[in-house]
Amino acid sequence: MTGKKSPWGSGGGDSVSPGDRELGEAPDSPPSSTPSGDGPRNPWLPPQSGKPGGNPGSGQRRGPNIEDIFRNRKGGGGGGGGRGPTMPRLPQRPDGKSWLPVGIAVVTALWLSTSMVHLISPQEKGVVTTFGAYSRTLDSGTAFTLPWPIQSVAVEDVTSVRSESIPEGDGEKLMLTGDQNLVDLTYLVRWNIKDLKQYMFQLAEPQQTVRELAEAAMRQSIAEVSLNDAMGAGRQQIEQSVRDRMQNVLDAYRSGVVIQGVDIKKTDPPTKVVDAFKEVLAAQQDAQSEVNRAQAWAQQLTARAGGEATAFDKVYEQYKLSPEVTRRRMYYETMERVLSQTDKVVLEAPGVQTYLPLPGLKRAEPAPAPVAAGGQ
């Protein structure tokens, strides 16, 4: 291998490796003291611009200068223009100064105005917290606080009545009555905020708490009544019982919530047994109708008997004053009432001719005398 040149320009007897050469010097370039020859060159280097006797540094490859990099980034000159992206420059004011301080001032003013000035409507109240801790309660009007994040304000409507419909949508809410029957209930709970501080800090989720408490109170109240009471006259009692149970629990937890009322909208049997339940309900209604009819007849009969008894008492008072006259009058009135409804047979005394007009019977009229023929 002695005397054979490497394809990278170094002979086999060279003691200097290509990596030990100076940065930018071609591996096949001879030392500065030795004239350059026409041997093999590095294929990755660009061709030399000069002749063999020319400037030895004109064909060398060198790394980029740090000043050139920054000059290109800023869009400067130096012969390197257009060699890389340029950063956009902020617009300047007519006097040559930057708009950046003005923009910062505008953003700061907006931040202070939105986090320090608060407009609260008449139906609302606000709770001020300082680093998350309760500070004070704001009434309606304009209020000022320290900027965020030092102080923040949470505003809630405290006058409007809120409502929770249970169950949501068209779902079923089956509950067990005291006589072991199932009933499908749909009801509405109306509530509002009494104390905003307690409402904000005592309960994590006040609305969900009201819904779950309403369901628990309704199940407890339904379990104490029968199916007929739940679907009939006992509704008002159930609604009042649920409201009282809910309010007692909410007051114990200092929730700041007032239950305005509970309204039962629907009480139906389960869907699977609704047909059978309708038949039973129809039979119960028929039975109740018969009972009502019998009671009406009894009341009518009792009233008539009472009237007759009163009339008899009045007659008896007259009878005690004049027994013989009253007895004869009563006899005649009774005979008149009885004989007016029966057929009558009249027995006459001997030698007496009586004219009795019988219904449908007419006296025979005498026939007219015949007229003689040709006579006048």
Image (cartoon, rainbow, N blue to C red):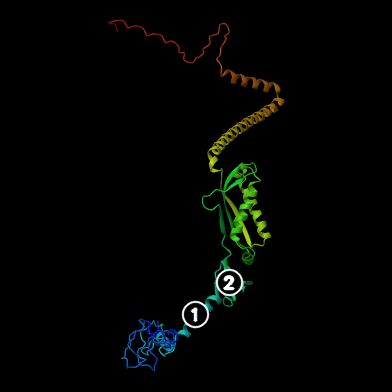
Residue drawn at the location 65% of the way across and 31% of the way down: 306
Q: Quadrant of the C terminus?
A: top left
Residue drawn at the location 58% of the way across and 73% of the way down: 152
Reply above or below: 199 against 148. above
Which residue was labeled with disc 1? 107
Residue 149 at x, y = what percent?
58, 75
Q: Quadrant of the N terminus?
A: bottom left
Looking at this rendering, what residue extends furthest in the left direction? 374
Give residue 223's mark: none
Residue drawn at the location 70% of the way across and 28% of the way down: 317
Q: Nearer the viewer, residue 252 or 122?
A: 252
Q: How many labels were placed on the picture?
A: 2
Please name the amino acid that badge 2 sits on: Val
Residue 307 at x, y = what percent?
64, 31
Q: Is residue 237 visible?
A: no
- Along the horizontal axis of the image, is 85 left or right of 293? left
Reply above or below: 26 against 193. below
Residue 75 at x, y = what percent?
39, 86
Q: Nearer the viewer, residue 355 or 59?
A: 59
Please name the amino acid that badge 1 sits on: Val
Q: Earlier in the sequence, mark 2 or mark 1?
A: 1
Q: Secondary structure at mark 2?
A: strand
Q: Nearer the viewer, mark 2 or mark 1?
A: 1
Q: Secondary structure at mark 1?
A: helix
- Along the horizontal axis of the image, is 69 left or right of 347? left
* Location of residue 248 (image quadrant): bottom right
CA distance separating discs 2 and 1 = 21 Å
Q: Residues within 10 Å of mark 1 (few under 14, many from 20)?
A: few
Give residue 153's mark: 2
